[in-house]
Amino acid sequence: MVFEETVVLNGPFDEVLAATKAALADQGFGVLTEIDMQHTLRSKINKQIDRYVILGDCNPRLAGAALDIEPQVGALLPCNVVVHEVGRRHRARRRARPRADGVDDRSRRVGGDR
């Protein structure tokens, strides 16, 4: 079962991050949180990692519709997109696709693959 989608992008990390935020906005998602894991792990436990940013994003229309169908879906909100460095490439990953085998048709009305 696939829980995330990956897009590999080339370019400076800050440009890839900005392009990811713009693509989210184009689809009606706003960024609610931005967590810089490189900074957090370095400052908390002195661990060095490549650049790694978690964007907590939400499309209010889709979130509202999902909550109408299943209030417990709030445990999966906001949706997360991870932008991280892998060598010279940068990856954007969306976590927790809200569709999986065995899910009833009501979830597909909410937004399917978004």
Image (cartoon, rainbow, N blue to C red):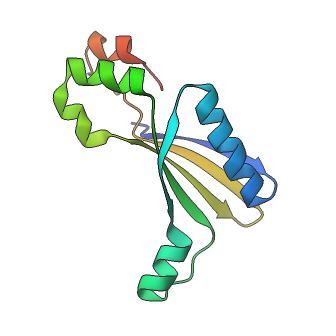
Name the image quarter holding residue 7: top right
Residue positioned 70% across, 48% down in the render: 18
Q: Is residue 56 or residue 100 the one in the foreground?
A: 56
User: Position of 62 compared to 69: left or right?
Assistant: right
Q: Where does the image place residue 51, in percent across and percent down from the top left?
A: 63, 68
Whether residue 32 is visible, yes or no, is yes
**Residue 95 spot, x, y in % from top left:** 44, 43
**Residue at the extreme bottom of the image, as rendered:** 46
Residue lying at 65% horizontally and 52% vertically, measured from the top left: 91
Q: Is residue 110 left or right of residue 70?
A: right
Q: How many marks?
A: 0
Q: Position of residue 73 (x, y in %)?
A: 24, 33
* Quadrant housing residue 69: top left
Q: Quadrant of the N terminus?
A: top left
Q: Position of residue 22 (x, y in %)?
A: 67, 37
Left or right, 110 with respect to 86, comes to left
- Residues 5 and 36: in front is 36
**Relative to residue 31, is residue 29 depicted above or below?**
above
Q: Is residue 101 visible?
A: no
The residue at the point 48 percent across, 26 percent down is: 114
Position of 79 relative to 17 (above/below): above
